[in-house]
C-alpha cells in the first residue's frame, strides 16, 4: 500500500480491495494502520471491520445503484463507495462529511474522473435511504453458499447464527489460576473502574462490559490474565489434566490454549506445542513469556509425525484443527469474503488426517480432545463419526456439561451474541493396552 498521504477512507478502500483479492485483515490492515497517527488508527480499524461485516448487504445496495460495474482498474472506487455506504448506514458520521471526504478520497486515489459518479451514487443513497434487502444474502450480510449451508445444517437456528455473526464480540479474559482466583481479579477490575462479570461456563473466565486496551487491565503485563473467548477456554475442562502427564497442543498458535493448559495444571511433566506457521510461533513464545510459563515449541506439520515426534507417547492431546472458522465470524468478519464453499471438503480431509495421526501418538489410556471454531457439521461431529468407523478401538466419551448442544458425537456451541463464540468439542479415549 504505497503513498503516505492517503486519507482514511482511501486507505480503507485499499484494505477492502486487498481482502477481496484474498488477503486477511490481519495481513493487510497493519501496514495501512502504520500510515496513520495513533489517534486515527481505531477509526480505520472500525471502517475496515464494519465494511467487511456488512459487505454483502452494502454490495447488494451498491450494485443496485450502479448502471454497470466499474472496470477492474477502478475497482478500488467500488470499495471506496462501500466504505461510504457503511458510514451512511451504520455509523454516526455526519452525512456531508462522508460525501465530501469520499469525493476527496476518490481524487487521492488518482481517479478524479469518477468523482461525479461517486457523488451521484452517494447523494441518491442518502436521499432514498437503505433499500429492502433483495435476498437472504443481503439481509443477513453473508455469502449465499454460507446462508444455504447454515440453513441446511441448522434448520431451527440458522437465522440466529447469522444475526450473532453480525454482532461485535465481547471481550473475554482468562484469569491465570497460578496468580489469582477469579473473584480476586473481579475485585481488581472493579477497583480499576472496569465493569465485568464471571463467565457462565468457563471456570476462569471473565467477560467485560466494554472492551478496553489490554494495558488498562490490572497486572496484564505481569501475566495476571489473557484475552481468550469463553468457548476456547473450555478445552482445559475436558482434558482432565493430572500431575506428571505429557501433553501435546497440536495446532497451537497463537498459544492461548497452550498457556491455559499450563496454568490449569502446574505439575505436568511437559507440554509440547506445535504449529506449522513459522510466522505464528513467536506469538506462542510471547504469551508464554508474559505468563512466565514453559513449553517445548516445534515448527512442524503435526500430521507428519515422523518429522517431529520423538517416540514418547502423549497422555493428553488437544487437537484444535484448522477449520472454516465459521464460529468466529463476529471477531473476523473478513471470513465472509475469504472463505469459499470449495474449502470445506479439503478442510474436512485435513481434519480427519490430523485426527488419525494424533491417535497413533496418544498413549494407551490417554485422552484426545478434538476442537474446532466451526459451526458446520461436516467439520465437527461428522469427522468424529468417520473416525470412529475407521478406528474401532477409540472410545467416545460423553461430555457432561451445561453448555452447547449434544450432537451425535461431541457438543456444539453456537455463537451467542452475549457471550461465547461458535465452537465444537469431542473427547476420545484410547483403551489401556
Image: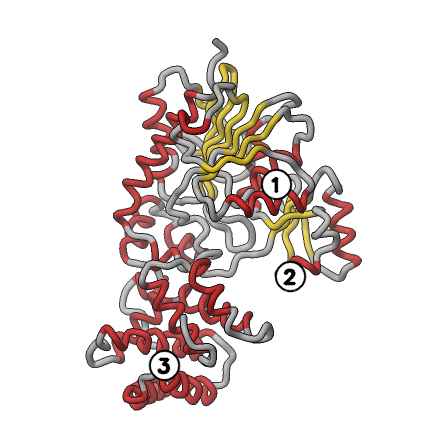
Which quadrant would residue 361 be assigned to in this image? top left
- Left or right of 219? Residue 310 is left
Vertical order, 216 against 398 (above or below)? below
- Depth-wise, is mark 2 or mark 1 nearer the camera? 2
List the residue tagged with mark 3: 109
Q: Where is residue 339 in the image (x, y as percent from the top left)?
A: 33, 53
Q: What element does badge 1 sit on?
A: loop
Q: Distance between the residues labelled 2 and 1?
A: 22 Å
Q: Distance between the residues labelled 3 and 1?
A: 48 Å
Q: Is residue 389 left or right of residue 280?
A: left
Label placed on residue 202: 1
> Helix, strand or loop at disc 3?
loop
Q: Going by the picture, which residue comes out furthest to the top? A: 433
Q: Which residue is drawn at 27% across and 49% down?
A: 341
| Residue at 59 percent of width and 72 percent of height | 38
250 in relation to 25, above or below:
above
Which residue corresponds to mark 2? 213
Q: Nearer the viewer, residue 210 or 407?
A: 210
| Towards the viewer: 402 or 394 | 394
Q: Nearer the viewer, mark 3 or mark 1?
A: 3
| Tag 2 secondary structure | loop
Which residue appears at 32% of the width and 88% of the height? 112
Q: Quadrant of residue 245?
A: top right
Q: Can residue 263 be seen in this view?
A: yes
Amino acid at each position: 500500500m504505497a503513498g503516505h498521504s492517503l486519507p482514511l477512507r482511501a486507505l480503507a478502500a485499499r484494505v477492502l480491495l486487498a481482502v477481496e483479492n484474498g488477503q486477511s485483515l490481519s495481513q493487510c490492515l497493519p501496514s495501512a494502520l502504520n500510515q496513520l497517527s495513533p489517534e486515527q488508527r481505531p477509526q480505520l480499524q472500525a471502517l475496515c471491520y464494519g465494511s467487511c461485516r456488512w459487505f454483502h448487504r452494502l454490495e447488494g445496495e451498491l450494485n443496485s445503484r450502479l448502471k454497470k460495474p466499474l472496470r477492474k482498474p477502478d475497482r478500488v472506487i467500488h470499495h471506496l463507495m462501500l466504505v461510504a455506504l457503511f458510514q451512511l448506514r451504520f455509523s454516526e458520521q455526519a452525512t456531508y462529511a462522508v460525501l465530501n471526504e469520499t469525493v476527496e478520497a476518490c481524487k487521492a486515489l488518482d481517479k478524479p474522473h469518477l468523482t461525479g459518479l461517486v457523488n451521484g451514487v452517494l447523494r441518491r443513497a442518502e436521499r432514498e435511504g437503505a433499500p429492502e434487502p433483495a435476498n437472504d444474502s443481503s439481509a443477513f450480510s453473508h455469502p449465499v453458499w454460507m446462508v444455504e449451508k447454515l440453513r441446511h445444517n441448522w434448520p431451527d437456528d440458522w437465522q440466529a447464527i447469522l444475526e450473532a455473526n453480525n454482532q461485535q464480540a465481547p471481550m473475554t479474559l482468562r484469569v491465570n489460576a497460578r496468580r489469582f482466583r477469579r473473584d480476586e481479579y473481579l475485585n481488581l477490575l472493579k477497583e480499576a473502574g472496569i465493569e465485568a462479570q464471571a463467565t457462565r461456563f468457563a471456570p476462569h473466565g471473565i467477560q467485560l462490559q466494554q472492551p478496553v486496551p489490554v494495558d488498562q487491565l490490572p497486572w496484564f503485563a505481569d501475566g495476571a490474565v489473557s484475552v481468550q473467548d469463553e468457548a476456547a477456554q473450555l478445552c482445559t475442562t475436558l482434558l482432565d489434566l493430572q500431575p506428571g502427564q505429557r501433553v501435546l497442543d497440536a495446532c497451537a498458535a497463537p498459544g492461548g490454549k497452550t498457556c491455559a493448559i499450563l496454568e490449569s495444571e502446574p505439575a505436568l511433566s511437559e507440554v509440547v506445542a506445535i504449529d506449522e506457521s513459522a510466522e505464528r510461533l513467536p506469538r506462542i513464545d510471547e504469551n508464554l513469556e508474559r505468563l512466565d510459563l514453559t513449553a517445548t515449541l516445534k515448527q512442524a506439520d503435526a500430521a507428519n509425525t515422523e518429522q517431529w515426534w520423538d517416540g514418547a507417547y502423549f497422555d493428553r492431546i488437544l487437537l484444535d484443527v484448522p477449520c472454516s472458522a465459521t464460529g468466529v465470524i463476529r471477531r473476523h468478519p473478513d471470513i465472509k469474503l475469504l472463505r469459499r464453499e470449495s474449502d470445506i471438503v479439503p478442510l474436512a480431509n485435513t481434519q480427519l488426517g490430523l485426527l488419525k495421526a494424533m491417535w497413533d501418538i496418544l498413549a494407551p489410556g490417554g485422552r484426545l480432545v478434538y476442537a474446532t471454531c466451526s459451526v458446520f457439521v461436516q467439520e465437527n461431529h461428522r469427522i468424529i463419526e468417520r473416525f470412529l468407523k475407521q478406528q474401532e478401538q477409540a472410545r467416545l466419551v460423553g461430555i457432561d456439561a451445561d453448555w452447547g448442544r449434544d450432537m451425535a458425537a461431541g457438543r456444539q456451541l453456537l455463537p451467542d451474541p452475549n457471550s461465547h463464540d461458535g465452537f465444537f468439542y469431542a473427547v476420545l479415549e484410547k483403551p489401556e493396552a
